[in-house]
Image: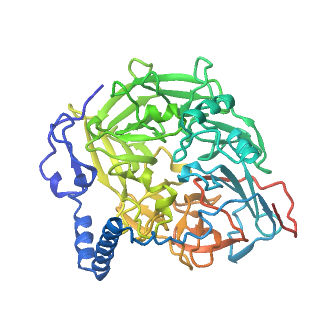
Amino acid sequence: SASSGKQAPEGVGRSRRCEVESRSGTHRSWAEMDCQNEGARKRTNALKNDRRYGSTVMMRTSLFLSCFVGGLFGLGPPPRPRRLGTALEEGREMSFAGLEVVGRLPSWLQGGYLRNGPGSFDGGHLFDGLALLARFDIGGDGPPRLKTRFLESVARKEFVRTGRRVFGEFGTPLGPLGFLRSLRFGGPVTDNAVVSVAKVGEAYVAATETAAFEIDGESLRTLGPFRRVDDKGKNTQIRTAHPERHGSGFVNVATDVLRNRYDVLTFDSHLGRPVKVASIKSRRRFDVAWVHAFAVTASGKVVFFETPAVYDLRSLLGGAVKFKWRPDRRTWIHVVDLNLNQETSQATFEAPANFFTFHCANAFESRDGNIHVDVCAYEDSSIVDGLRLANMRNASYDVPSSTLSRLSINLTSSHTTTTVERLDDHDGDFAEFADVNPKFKGSDYSFAYALGAQRPTSAANVVTKTNVRLRKTTTLKSALNYAAFSEPTFVPTPDATTEDDGVVLSVGHRADTGEAHLLVFDARTCTELARVVVPSPGIPYGFHGIWDPSPSSKSSSSSSSSS
């Protein structure tokens, strides 16, 4: 594997870009890598001079003292709850027709918006919720319609039958007896496919790292497990829930926790016929990192990260999913060329600093042959703990910071180097669930749409648009204030002439009334076009969604029902 190289050229220290030698004895943190960002320094200084900063410091100091005194004498008040509307309320299976629309939906926006996410909150973590699928149908005859349905996994069926979990989850460990009991149901790992939904050929698939199910895209009925095997026909236990399209097929990265390796696999258009393109040993002898997502360029360069967030194997044996943050392991960038054979397709580079990431926005190759990967990057993995329900519901908790940043791999110099550069300039210092125009996926592009934060907040509560060329971020303007938003999805207009010609879809949750709305933003002007009001009891927080441009075959109805 190649290693990142020499000292930074003169003058880099005064720009937004940082370049380091990977073999250097010092390994700076992600925050230190961003300290040379002049804009960030100015914003920080302005914030310190602002009254809000002073009041925030006073609030946190007061909170610390009250907790300290309360801890000594047992008199401390309970945490003040944060109102997130219906975001963390139990979901229900519903079917509504004739949803109210405030504003005007674009006439060309016709199809279905499918979403996956947690529908129950009996566990300790946001990732523990049993998968609840939702579909908004827009366009055609009549007003928008909504249908929600729980995924009929073994985890869901047994919970309904017995009232208890049969698999361990992120925040819901089972213990020794629970581990043995889970083996009866194919455990110990869960089959709660709560993360994503994708269209694979004519099929629809709901997935998580450890399981996938085929669903009916119209009724959301669960059709059965979607079999995931490796190139030898064996079941792959851990695989990202985000297979990427490439050419006429798909690519994915699988993690083998027993053999300490990562396999890059290609598939046909139906996610079948897997072919192992590369097998990369972990940089750590006795553990492997959590790889939640990856990126692939248009020419077929697969890029994924081996961060210090490593699996806690002991917790896996107990059915729960936990991670250890091992900064001494450092962060590594793996690149696999799908066009080459296994012996020549792999290269590994050390990142300029440790970081943690859930999602990549995009990856592309510049004309000089260098690779650029844009990620939502955190300094460490504390965001995983931040998604515990107790933290999200705590009004005093503030979500950890993250940035939309670009990692560039310079392959043209004699000594390969990696650099990092911040792309966004949002005052909330938060970026997650970044999306781009699908026509620009894997190619050089201009705009990324992500969730941001208007602090203090325990959840992402604004939607942003970043011009990655100008390094400028704009908050999408809505008529109302929202306590939480789910992943933004960009939908291009059918005859788009510019990259940002389209709309951005996201579900927002109001704190005051508790209502959930599907918001439709004009991506070019960053303004709200319309919002679809979800009737009570609303829908909870969601993770990932897709736009299905095929109109629903269901005819509209004037009645609504819920169960």
Give the percent coordinates (x, y) of residue 551. Answer: 77, 56
Residue 311 to residue 156: above or below: above
Q: Quadrant of residue 496?
A: bottom right
Q: Where's the N terminus, which quadrant?
A: top left
Q: Which of 107 and 27 is in front in this view?
A: 27
The residue at 24%/60% (across/down) is 37
The residue at 36%/25% (across/down) is 286
Residue 55 to residue 373: above or below: below
Q: Is residue 208 visible?
A: yes
The residue at 73%/59% (across/down) is 92
The reply, left or right, for residue 480 in relation to residue 563 is left
Q: Where's the C terminus, which quadrant?
A: bottom right
Residue 13 to residue 348: above or below: below
Give the percent coordinates (x, y) of residue 291. Answer: 45, 38
Residue 440 to residue 6: above or below: below
Q: Nearer the viewer, residue 286 or 330?
A: 286
Q: Quadrant of residue 512?
A: bottom right
The residue at 60%/46% (across/down) is 196
Q: In which quarter of the image is residue 49?
A: bottom left
The reply, left or right, for residue 402 in relation to residue 420 is right
Q: Which of 127 and 42 is in front in this view?
A: 127
